[in-house]
Image (spheres, helix red, strand yellow):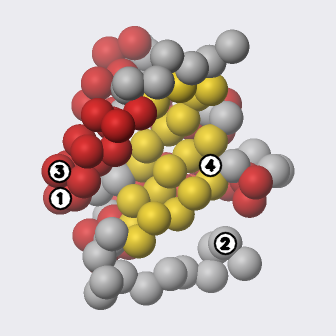
Amino acid sequence: MKVNIFLSYCWDDSSEADRIYDYFKRDQNIELHRDKIDIKKWGSIKEYMQSINNMDYTILLISDSYLKSANCMYEVLEVMRDRNYKDKIFPAVIDSGAYMIPLLG
């Protein structure tokens, strides 16, 4: 059984997202979902966004740009719709200027 992981990132941080995607795609037991690659599988951006809370895990690539992006914050809200979201998210601060928000507490 494959583990489904959603990668939430700001497009400004695409190079970091590329490295993470390349790392996980080597593992046959993990399917990493990323908007630029997977959005075509769903009928619309809305359907894609609604699929986020069905993922097994979510990696949040947190940067200043991420925290300022309305789209990224919408993704975080979709993840938080799952009652067990705290056990399913892996925040990764990729910009030392970004501050963790009290969403994980």
Residue denoted by label 3: 15
Q: Tell whether label 2 touches label 1 (CB within 8 Å).
A: no
The CA span between labels 3 and 1 is 8 Å
* Residue 2 percent coordinates (x, y): 62, 18
Please name the residue shown 62% across and 42% down the image: 57
Whole-Å distance between the Cαs marked 4 and 2? 12 Å
Give the camera-side residue of 24 and 17.
24
Which amino acid type is marked by label 2?
Leu
Label 2 CA crowd tier, 10 Å (few <14, some 14–19, many 20+):
few
* Mark 4 in CB contact with mark 2 (< 8 angstroms): no
Q: Say which mark, if any, is on residue 12.
A: 1
For residue 104, the mark is 2
Q: Earlier in the sequence, mark 2 or mark 3?
A: 3
Spatial CA span between label 4 and label 1:
21 Å
Q: Write down the residue under mark 4.
A: 79
In the structure shown, which secondary structural element does the residue marked by tag 4 occupy? helix
How packed mark 3 is, by other alpha carbons closer than 10 Å (few <14, some 14-19, many 20 or more), is: few
Q: Which of marks 3 and 4 is nearer the N terminus?
A: 3
